[in-house]
Structure formats: C-alpha cells, structure tokens
Image: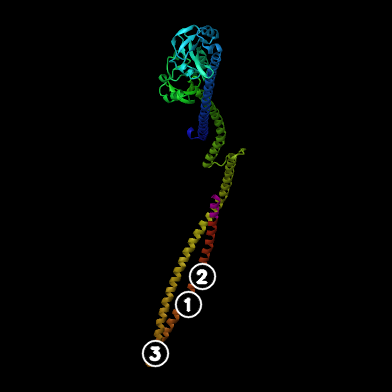
Amino acid sequence: MKFTQSLKFNFLLWILGAFFLASIGQSFVSYWSGKDILIQQIQENCTQIADATGAEIDSWIEGKFSEMSTLAKLDEVKKMDAERLPALLSGLMSADHDNLYVVWPDGTVVGDIGHMDFKLDDRNYFKLAMEGKANIDTPVLSKATGNLVAPVAVPIYRGDKVVGVLGATIKAEKVTEITSQVKVGETGYAYLINQDTTFVAHPKKDYILQKKLSDEAEGIEDIISRMTALERGIAEYKFDGVAKYMAYDPVELAGWSLAVTVPVSEVTQPLDNMLHKMIMVTIVTLLLLSIIVWFVTGRLTKPILGMVGITTRLSQRDLTQEIESKNRSEIGLLMNSLRDMNDNLNAVLKQMAGSSERLASVSDNLMQTARQTGQASEQVSASAEEVARAAAAEAEDAQKTSELVQQVGLAMQNVGSTTEGISQQSINFKNIVGRVTGLMLRQKDEMALTVDSTVNVAGVIEELSNKTQEIGEIINVINNIAGQTN
C-alpha cells in the first residue's frame, strides 16, 4: 500500500488542511478587520492632528492680532503723528517684528525708520484692515533680512471710525516650526497652502513660496478645491505614485489650509507585520501539529494494522492465533470481537469435525441402504413380472373356460334335440368336464402363486419405506451440519 493511500497520510492531509484553511481564514479576517479599524483610527488621528495644528496656528495668529490690536489702541498710535511715530514704533517693536508701520487711508506709510517711499493702498491686507478686519497675508521672503515674514494688519479706530491701519511684518518661521513638528508614522508630515495653493509651510524649504500643490499633485483637483474653500475632511490620493492619506483643516484667521499626509503603506505596516507574524505562527503551529498528528495517527493505526494481520491469517484459515487487547476504546472492542469470531470458528470447526465422522458413518449406511434398495427394486420388478404373467395366464384360462362353458351349453341343447348321439355326446361331455376341471385346478394354482407374489411385493415395499425413513434421517443430519457451518 502506498503511503498516500494510508490512514496516516489521510489524517495528516485532512487535519492539517482543515487547520491551514481555518488559520488562513482567521488571519485574513483579522487582517482586514484590523486594517479597517487601524485605517479609521489613523484617519481620525490625522484629522485630530490637523485640527490641533490648525488650531495652534490660528491661536498664534490670533495672539498676533491681539498684540497688534493692543498697540493700535495706544493714544500715540491713534493720533497718527507722522513726526513722532517712527520713534514710537521703534520702541514698540519686538523680536518677532521685522518692521512696524502705520498706513494712512491713502496708502501713505510711516514706519519705525520714518517715511516710506511707497504706498500700500493696493494691498489686500490693507483693504481688509480698512474694512475693520484684522488679517494676515501670505508670508514672503524679506528682501532686507531674508527672513520668512507675513504681513499683519489691524484697523486703528477713533471711536467707531477706522482712521488708519497698524501693520507689521512678523517672522513666520513659527508657522513653519508648528507644521514641522507634526509627525505621522515614519514619513508623514504637514504643510500649509494659501488660496492659490502656494506652499506657505512645508518640510522641504525649497517648496515654500516656490511651488504650488496644484502643480505637484495631479488628479486631486477636487481635494484642492475643498481645501481652498476652507473645508475639513480626509481623502486618499497618489503623489509620485505613492498612495497617501491626507487630512485637511482650515486656518480660518489666515484663510489657509493645513494638510497632514501619510503614506498608506505606513498606516498598514503594523498590520502587515502582524500578518507576517500570524503566518509564521501558523507555519510553526502546522509543523507542531504535524508531529502531534503523526504520533497520534501512529497510535491509532498500529492496532488497525494488527487487525489487518489477524484478518489476513484468518483468511488463510489460520485459527491458531491468540488475540487479546487491553484497549478500552472502539478499536479494543473490535479486537475482542475478532477474538470471539476466531474462538467461534474454532468451535464450529471442531463440531464440523465430529459431524464429519457421523456423516461418514451415515454415508456408509446410506450406501448399504442404497444397495439394498436396488436389490429390493429388482425383486419388486421380478415379482411384478410374475404377477403380470400369472394374470395373463389366468385371463387365458378364463377365456378357455368360457369357451368350454359355451360348448357345454351347446351340447346340452344337442341332447334335447336328438337321442341318437347321446352316447357319443356323453363321452364328449365327459372329456369336456375333465378338461374344465383341469383348467380350474390350474387356475387355482396360478391364483395361489399370484397371492404369494403379492405378499412378496408388499414386503419389499415395506422395506423400501423403512429405507426411505433412514434416508430422511441422513438428510436431516446433513442439514444440521450445514446450519452449523453457516
């Protein structure tokens, strides 16, 4: 028998196959369920980071607005004395300021270093401030210091009327510092874009104010439009062929949009590691299970192989083997059943041996009875022939007697008609009577012979009946032996 046809191989195949399928199924179900949960958590985390970072930038900008609004409320500032403003503004400057200035409604500028030879009436932040809105514009690189600065403008009120604008170019490295502190996964980062999608803050400095998101990431126009509309959300996109998640949140005070992005592969990497570990655990478990199943099936198949040997010897008519099992399981019961069968076959064969001797004796008697029956049959046949012959002779004599009687009748008639032949007729009549008497005597003897033959036939028939009974007994013995054998 081939190993692939053995019970051990089939046990290994089915048990390990079932365990493998169950393990793989469980692993993939766990992986996909965990992946959905982890992705959801990462997305929520990215969204929370974006919200928190956007709120931090908003808070920083709001602090600058509050600081500038406080300065704008100073009486010396509200007087807008062009001669005294330079010294005043110079004294109010802090380390975060590149410059500090006041703008008249016509756009004239007086700064901490005196009158400026340009006007700002065309700048958007000036217009918004004149409308009573504190605001910050897109950062720029300062030509004087080379620092990244952002224009901040707040209205100057006299009563309820806006009479001018207090402006400053504040160092915007703080914005870059805040965004650069954001870390998601291994390579995840945050960046800021303004309304025209120009990068305001980015981990790569050569991107700041030099590149636009709309130029760098193609195919995400819908996401960009939502970002510039100052919406919040999360989306999946591809950048340089790498699938990424991006959570975006508005910086409402500045009109910017903050994005937190992370590669999908980094999000699922813990799950991939977990899947690899689960596969390794499954493989090791399969190996251990193979060893266990090998030994267990060996213990199970060993008594089965023993039973195969027993049945093989039984098929070869060997009933001398001793069968005994201490196993209390179904296999032990089967072994004990084989033992009982072996013992029963031994007992049956012993009975058959005794019955065979009886059968031989009965067979001899049957042969003798058959011979005697044959002889009796011959006697019956001979007696039947004698009876037939006697009956035929009797019939012939009866015929002759009938003819003689007819002749006597005729003779009696002739006696009545003539007397001349009485003498001759009397002689004839005497002869006829003598002949009739002889025939009657012969008939009597033949009838006696017939009776004797009939008696002989009856005896033979009785003897045949006895022999038939003996044959019936022999047949019963044979049937009993056949029943025991079955």
Secondary structure mostly seen in magenta is helix
User: Residues under labels 3 and 1: Cα distance?
Assistant: 29 Å
Earlier in the chain: of badge 3 and badge 1, it is 3
* Above or below: residue 446 compared with residue 138: below
Q: Secondary structure at mark 2?
A: helix
Crowding around mark 2 (Cα neighbors within 10 Å: few <14, some 14 to 19, many 20+) is: few
Earlier in the chain: of badge 2 and badge 3, it is 3
Q: Quadrant of residue 66?
A: top right
Would residue 389 be seen by someone viewing this image from the given angle? yes
Q: Is residue 309 magenta?
A: no
Q: Which residues are magenta?
A: 477-486
The residue indicated by pointer 3 is: 413
Residue type at mark 2 is: Val
Q: Is residue 241 left or right of residue 339?
A: left
Question: Closer to us: mark 2 or mark 1?
Answer: 2
Residue 105, given in percent of the width and then of the height, sits at 47, 15
Residue 130, given in percent of the width and then of the height, sits at 48, 18
Q: Secondary structure at mark 3?
A: helix
The residue indicated by pointer 2 is: 455
- Residue displayed at 41% across by 79% down: 399
Q: Is residue 478 magenta?
A: yes
The residue indicated by pointer 1 is: 444
